[in-house]
C-alpha cells in the first residue's frame, strides 16, 4: 500500500497536510489563492484543493467519479498557445504556456460548460489538470477560470474539488474515469483494469466531444450497473462502438505541458 504524504510547512500562518490513499483528507480550504503560485513554485509537484471521499451514494448505487482535464478538454487552449508561439521572446519565456496570465481568459470549448452542468447530475465531478511548472500564475489562473464559469460556492461542481499535478496517476481510484485529451502526466495510467479506473480520451473519437455524443455516452456509463466500471463502459459502448482512446505510443507530443 502506497501512502503519499505531503507536508507544506512554509506557507504563512496555515500549514496543511494531505494524503493520498484512495481517499484524501484536508487541504487548502484556508489557503488564499495568492498562495497557490508560491505553493506551485516551491512545492508544486501536486496540489489537492479538494476532499475526495471514496464512495458517494446516489439512488442506492455507488456514484461514479469523473475527473476532467482542463486544457483542450474543457478549455479551448490550443488556438491561443499556437497564436502566441511566435511571441515568446517578448515575454522572455521559452514556450507559450509559460507566458504569465495566458491561462486566465481562455474560452471554454463549445458545449463544455453546459455539458459539465449536465454531467454533475450523474457523476461526482473533479478537475484533474496540469499547470505548467515554469508558469506559477497558471496555477492561480486555472482556479479563477473555474470560478468564472462555475461559481465559487457549493453550487459549483468543482468547488474545492480541484487537483493540479504532473502525476495524474496518483489520483486514480476504483470506479472512476478520467476524461483527458492526452496521455501525458500519468493520464494514460488511468487505464488500469486492476484498480478499475479508466482513461477516456477526449475527442479521439470525433463523436466524443461536448457538441456531439460525449455527454449522453458518459451518462449511460454513469447509470449502468454491471458490477465493474469496465463492464459499464462496455455496455454503454455496445451500440455505437466509439473509439475510446488512442494507442499511447503513437501519440504526437506537443511542446508544452
Ligand atoms: Mg489537456
Image (tube, helix red, strand yellow):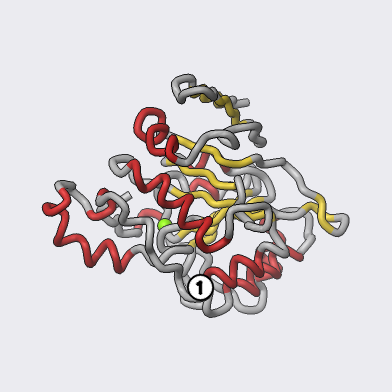
Where in the image, quadrant-wise, is ligand 1 located?
A: bottom left
Q: Is residue 208 above or below residue 195?
A: below
Q: Position of residue 175 (x, y in %)?
A: 69, 50
Residue drawn at point x = 26 percent, y = 48 percent = 98
Q: Residue furthest left?
A: 89
Residue drawn at point x = 44 percent, y = 62 percent = 246
Residue drawn at point x = 44 percent, y = 35 percent = 35
| Disc 1 target residue | 209
The foreground one among 3 and 106 is 106
Q: Residue furthest right?
A: 60
The quarter of the image holding the N terminus is top right
Q: Is residue 214 above or below residue 16?
A: below
Q: Position of residue 185 (x, y in %)?
A: 41, 45
223 left or right of 66? right
Image quadrant where residue 247 sits: bottom left
The foreground one among 229 and 76 is 76
Q: Report how many numbered discs are placed on residues in the image.
A: 1
Q: Is mark 1 within 8 Å of ligand 1?
A: no
- At label 1, counting other C-alpha atoms closer than 10 Å, the crowd grade (few under 14, some 14-19, many 20 or more) is many
58 left or right of 188? right
The foreground one among 107 and 215 is 107
Secondary-structure class at tag 1 = loop
Q: Position of residue 56 (x, y in %)?
A: 77, 48
162 left or right of 236? left
Image quadrant where residue 117 sits: bottom right
Residue drawn at point x = 12 percent, y = 54 percent = 90
Image quadrant where residue 42 sits: top left
Q: Position of residue 149 (x, y in %)?
A: 52, 63
Amino acid at each position: 500500500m502506497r501512502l503519499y504524504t505531503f507536508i507544506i510547512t512554509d506557507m504563512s500562518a496555515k500549514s496543511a497536510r494531505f494524503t493520498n490513499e484512495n481517499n484524501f483528507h484536508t487541504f487548502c480550504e484556508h489557503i488564499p489563492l495568492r498562495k497557490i503560485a508560491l505553493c506551485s513554485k516551491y512545492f508544486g509537484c501536486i496540489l489537492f484543493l479538494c476532499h475526495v471521499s471514496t464512495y458517494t451514494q446516489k439512488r442506492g448505487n455507488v456514484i461514479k467519479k469523473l475527473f476532467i482535464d482542463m486544457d483542450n478538454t474543457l478549455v479551448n487552449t490550443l488556438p491561443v498557445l499556437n497564436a502566441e508561439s511566435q511571441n515568446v521572446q517578448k515575454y522572455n519565456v521559452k514556450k507559450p504556456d509559460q507566458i504569465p496570465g495566458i491561462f486566465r481568459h481562455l474560452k471554454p470549448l463549445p458545449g463544455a460548460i453546459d455539458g459539465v452542468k449536465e454531467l454533475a447530475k450523474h457523476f461526482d465531478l473533479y478537475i484533474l489538470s496540469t499547470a505548467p511548472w515554469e508558469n506559477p500564475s497558471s496555477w492561480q489562473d486555472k482556479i479563477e477560470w473555474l470560478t468564472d464559469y462555475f461559481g465559487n460556492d457549493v453550487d459549483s461542481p468543482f468547488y474545492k474539488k480541484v487537483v493540479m499535478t504532473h502525476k495524474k496517476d496518483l489520483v486514480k481510484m476504483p470506479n472512476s474515469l478520467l476524461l483527458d485529451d492526452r496521455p501525458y502526466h500519468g493520464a494514460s495510467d488511468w487505464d488500469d483494469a486492476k484498480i478499475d479506473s479508466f482513461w477516456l480520451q477526449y475527442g479521439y473519437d470525433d463523436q466524443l466531444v461536448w457538441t456531439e455524443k460525449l455527454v449522453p455516452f458518459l451518462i449511460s456509463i454513469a447509470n449502468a450497473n454491471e458490477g465493474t466500471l469496465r463492464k459499464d463502459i462496455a455496455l454503454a459502448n455496445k451500440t455505437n462502438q466509439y473509439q475510446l482512446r488512442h494507442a499511447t505510443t503513437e501519440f504526437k507530443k506537443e511542446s508544452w505541458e
